[in-house]
Image (cartoon, rainbow, N blue to C red):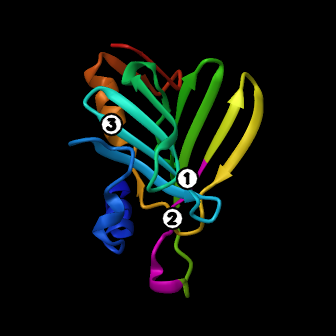
Amino acid sequence: MRIGVLTAVFTILPWHVFAAEGCFGNGTPLFHCTVKGGAKAVDVCLQSDVLIYRFGAPRGAAELLLAKRVENVRMQPWNGVGRSIWEELIVDNSGYSYNISYSIDRMIEDGADDHVAVPLGDVIIAKGAKILNVLKCDSGSVAVADFYPLFEAKEASGQCWSHGNSRWERC
């Protein structure tokens, strides 16, 4: 079901939107959206075993660029239950955390335009337990939203998701 919904969502989008700004070379785009009316972009990319988080002007230099090995990125994979497909990942940097998440409603309402699920996304920036800012993705701007390649990279690094404990552990 997950693959079917993601395929349906992304087949209606123009191909150029998949070229996430945060990807260098042959990186795999995991997330892209714009915020603040398109003035800024959020991109997450997987480059081999390194996750890259980029925030800044869509066509300019990054205001923030973080690179973390996949084993140092926190990720909550979709549990396979519920109305929405959702995932989140958290990149930590010097006491700050950047929580990137997306959701896709699997229950498209009758009468909805073209019966297409529109992905939603946001970034929560925190210092410790204090939330500093919540950046909601502009409506319709989530062009890439799939953290499964990160899941696979974490497994390849020797981590296994424990459903019972809801956390990553050494295999």
* Foreground disc of the pair 3, 1: 3
Task: Say which quadrant the C terminus sits in.
Answer: top left
Residue type at the position of mark 2? Ser
Marks 2 and 1: CB-CB under 8 Å?
no
- 66 on left or right of 99: left
Give me the residue at 54% from left, 58% from top: 34
**Which element is circle 1 on?**
loop
| Picture mark count | 3
Indicate which disc residue 82 carries: 1
Q: Which residue is mark 2?
A: 141
Q: Which residues are magenta?
A: 113-122
Amino acid under disc 1: Gly
Q: Which residue is mark 3?
A: 46
Residue under the image location 25 percent in, 30 percent down: 48
Residue 87, percent across and down? 50, 43
| Of callouts 3 and 2, the N-terminal one | 3
**Nearest to the observer: residue 25 or residue 146:** 25
Query: Quadrant of residue 23 in the image?
Result: top left
- Look at discs 2 and 1 and give the one toward the viewer: 2
- Asked whether, in this view, residue 62 is left or right of residue 130, the answer is left
Residue type at tag 3: Leu
**Quadrant that contains the N terminus:** bottom left
Q: Which residue does the image show at 45% across and 19% down from the upper left? A: 72
